[in-house]
Amino acid sequence: MSEPRIHGIVLGGVGGQGVLSLAQIVLEALRRSGLHALQSEIHGMSQRGGSVHAQVCFSEVPLSSPIIDEGCADLLIALEPLEALRYVAMLRMNGHLVVSEEPQVNMEGYPPLDDVYAALKKVRGCHLVDTEDLARKLNHRQAGGMALLGMASKFLPVSDAVWHDVITERFSAKGARVTEKNIEAFNAGRGLVQEAVGV
Amino acid sequence: MALGTLALGVEAVGCAAFDAGIKGAFGYPGTPSTEGFEFVEAMIHAEPEGRVAQWAANEKVAYDLALGVSYAGHRTLVTMKHVGLNVAMDAYANSALTGVRGGLVLLVADDPGMHSSQNEQDSRRLAKFAWLPVLEPATVQECYDFTWRAFELSEALQVPVMVRLVTRLAHCRAHLVRREVMQPTGLGLAPKETIQDWVLIPSNARRRYVDLLAKQPRMVEALAPMNRLVAGIGRVGVAVAGMGRAYFEQLALEHPELKAMPRLEVAAYPMDPGLEPAFLAQVDEVFVFEEDYPVLEERLTFQRAGRIHGRLDGSLPRTGELTPRLLKEALGLRTADGKSASALDLPIRAPRFCDGCGHVDAYEAMQEALQNLGVPGARVFGDIGCYTLAAQEPMGAIHAVVEMGASISMAVGAAMAGQTPSVAVIGDSTFGHSGLPALLTAADSGVNVTIMILDNRVVGMTGQQPSQALDQVERMVLGMGIPASQVQVLTPLPRQHEANVKAMEAALQHPGPSVVVFRRECIQSIRRGVLKEHDQELKACAEQACCSTEARP
């Protein structure tokens, strides 16, 4: 009998970018896919532009620890490139990173952007997404998060139908138009990785 | 909750309190406890049926409100963070002696690792200090189930019962299974013959203290099913509680050999004094995994010195949060080889003032005024809220932050010791929390102190909850005895900078106590429209010249 596999996702970004909200969508999508899932988040500074991260663990068996150990995460979803670098050591050797290229420079000493990209490109399994360009093409300023989630969905055991349901419910209060735009961004992100994996 | 039945650990406590039929919920915001109250508040607002949810001016007030509900025969929940219990400690410790009528459950969220707190004190110690039961869940579902149990225990034992969470559990989100909702049904007033039990004059208090101690064996007996000894193979055991229990359980999923270890699982205190000797008889060596202080570890070490591994013998760090990694290392398990950390130097991205925050303008006026008066290095006493961010460089505008409301008294004390100028900076909600009595003393002392009240009209830091001092700050200041000539109300905006600097200079130069209120609504609150309705009502009232206009000074 082999031990149950426990999977981990780390989500990182800057306060105000919607890291926690994205984590909740992932958590609910996993739960609806029949998996046992837990999410851990740290509040308090989330609106004040500091580093924010959340973790989601899931498995086929009930879990009790919401924390992922270093070197054990399968996937990192980062809404900001410098923030992504903070969590690289959280990932397994064969783990994947889905990272927005768009920097949030709200601090002293932000390293040269080329150095940040170079450091990320050195990490195996890193998928950089030009969320700024995508947002422009989709005419949707906040498309980035959903697009990253779409790309990340390629690595998660959740069906398209479940993703769409969860996203729809999440944005339903904001109207059909907002929901539609977010589904569109999700699908665009999902399309990107087909290209990447296809090569 | 937009998404199904997912809830945070603290929310599960709030949800259980509603389901268990509370009549009233009270609290003061503080991370990581805030969402517990907000959750039950939302449930009560959706379905009031005579229930109330009320943020209080501070934790002691919240606790006393709950005590009143209990005294009236109803179930009640009161929520706070660990340091909030210090504020409510007088009420908590003495309510152990009075006892309760309707079930009273106290949710306390500890913050080991100090994610957003000034210390990492362990509330289990305060429960022991007050001779009261404390339950320690390890999962979100247990947060819910234990809260139900806490109400039952509280009524059976007639004492307040604490449910103690830590940050990781408080902010762990998971699926929750609810029970059938109970409607609030009162027990009525206590019988007449027990009327003296609630009057803690010494003659009654002596008797009630004896009663409280006599209840201890009953508490142990009632809690016994929550703690258990699991026999195992070998002479190396583990004692686990709270998140230590959660982490160990999960580790045992991946390392089945751990499942065979003899275990002591603790979820409630006071525990059976026979449990530890029985456990120690089965093992020669013990690893203790518990969150925060070495409470269980000390008890085991007291029973038998040597080969008890935990925070005291250095097997785990003495301070900070417990993590699965620390368990692995202590147990000598292999840790995973993951990707290498980036070689790039990663500067810290610290939280900072929001763009356009009025606090920044207030601080800039203060710093320039101090500069103009030739005291640019003046030491300033700060307080707890968003404005504490000013302690960070490059602003470096405040130089002491201790606990809620301390700024005013510290500045008065320093002024008495001869420090000039002596400046305190406090937010409107912290002022209402515990700055008021300090201001009364400041006014009475007559010393040269300048008190800046940064009034952003909400409890900004914890998520823009309503401030109880809303629209009342000047009246409160005048009421405490500060003369009207020494109370200024300014608008912290860049275009007001020159005028604000001049006003600050005048206040600093005044030889007695002076108060400068910097009022501009929190920009997060404006963005969310938190006070929109309130301000519209206020405006309508002013136009009709009715009651509320009198409320404005």
Image (cartoon, rainbow, N blue to C red):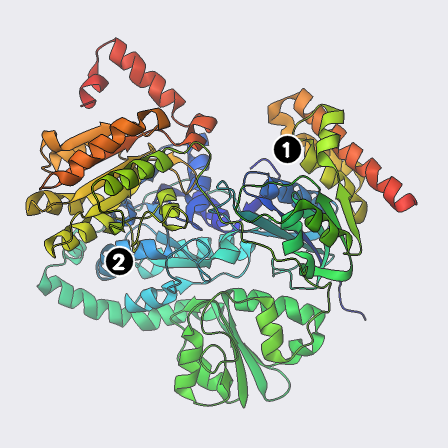
Residue under disc 2 on the same chain as residue under disc 1:
no
Q: Is residue B240 above or below residue B308?
A: above
Image quadrant of residue A171?
A: top right
Residue B368 location (% of width, % of height): 29, 38
Relative to B263, say whether B10 is above or below. above
Q: Quadrant of the N terminus of chain A?
A: bottom right
Q: Position of residue A88 (x, y in %)?
A: 69, 57
Q: Position of residue B532 (x, y in %)?
A: 40, 22
B418 sits to left or right of B392: left
Residue at image location 11% in from the left, 55% down from the top: B418
Q: Residues within 10 Å of mark 2 (few under 14, many from 20)?
A: some
Q: Where B358 sits versus B76, above or below?
A: above
- The quarter holding residue B199 reads bottom left
- Please name the amino acid that badge 2 sits on: Met
State the residue position of label 1: A170
Quadrant location of the C terminus of chain A?
top right
Q: Is residue B541 visible?
A: yes
Say whether residue B8 is left or right of residue B335. Answer: left
Residue receiving disc 2: B89
**Residue furthest to the top:** B544
Residue B399 marker: none
Viewer-nearest residue: B381 or B247: B381
What's under tag 1, amino acid-wise? Arg
Q: Secondary structure at mark 2?
A: helix
Q: Quadrant of residue B108?
A: bottom left
Q: Return the chain for callout 2.
A: B
Instruction: Using the numbered discs, state the Cα–Cα distance from disc 2 to disc 1 in whole angstroms.
Output: 41 Å
The residue under the point 52% across, 42% down is A49
